[in-house]
Structure formats: structure tokens, C-alpha cells
Image (cartoon, rainbow, N blue to C red):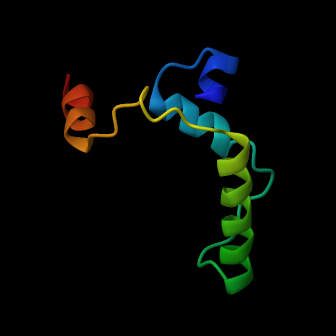
Amino acid sequence: MYIAKKDNIDELHAVWDSVLYESEDYPVLPLSDSDWKKLGDRASVLVKEHKVDWHVWDLNPHHWGHESFE
């Protein structure tokens, strides 16, 4: 994953946090239609900017639960 290599981040939660905290503003809940559009547009940009090597990440939620339990 691009960001993981760049920042030496090796766990999914840390990667997620590093991407989320790039946002400068957080919408007030409940989200309006314009908030949903803004978040969708931002998500599209993040997907383009942060390419994922899916072979590196374990995307099995059962494994995540076991890891969290340990």
C-alpha cells in the first residue's frame, strides 16, 4: 500500500486513521445531501491517491476479531 510504505505504517487501523485525519472539516450530524456528496467526492479522491495492494492486507473480519481478542 502506498501510504503504508511511505509512512512505515503496518496495521490497517493506523493506515485508516492516517487517511481520515487528512480531512480538515467534519460535518454535523445528521448528514445533509450536500454533506453526503462532499464525503463521496472526498472518498473518490482518497481512493485515487492511496492505491492499495490487496495482496498485503488480510481482509477477513474473522481474523480481525481474533487478532483484537488476542
Lateral position of residue 16 relative to residue 38, left or right: left
Q: Position of residue 54 (x, y in %)?
A: 45, 35
Q: Where is residue 28 in the image (x, y as percent from the top left)?
A: 68, 71
- Residue 9 versus residue 53 in the image, above or below: above
Viewer-closest of 50 and 28: 50
Q: Position of residue 8 (x, y in %)?
A: 61, 14
Tell me where residue 61 sits by quadrant.
top left
For the point 19% across and 40% down, the residue is 62
- Residue 49 versus residue 5 in the image, above or below: below
- Residue 45 versus residue 21 in the image, above or below: below
Q: Position of residue 15 (x, y in %)?
A: 56, 32
Which image quarter is the C terminus in? Answer: top left
For the point 73% across and 43% down, the residue is 49
For the point 70% across and 19% down, the residue is 6
Tell me where residue 7 sits by quadrant.
top right
For the point 65% across and 28% down, the residue is 2
Q: Return the residue found at the far bottom.
A: 33
Tell me where residue 33 sits by quadrant.
bottom right
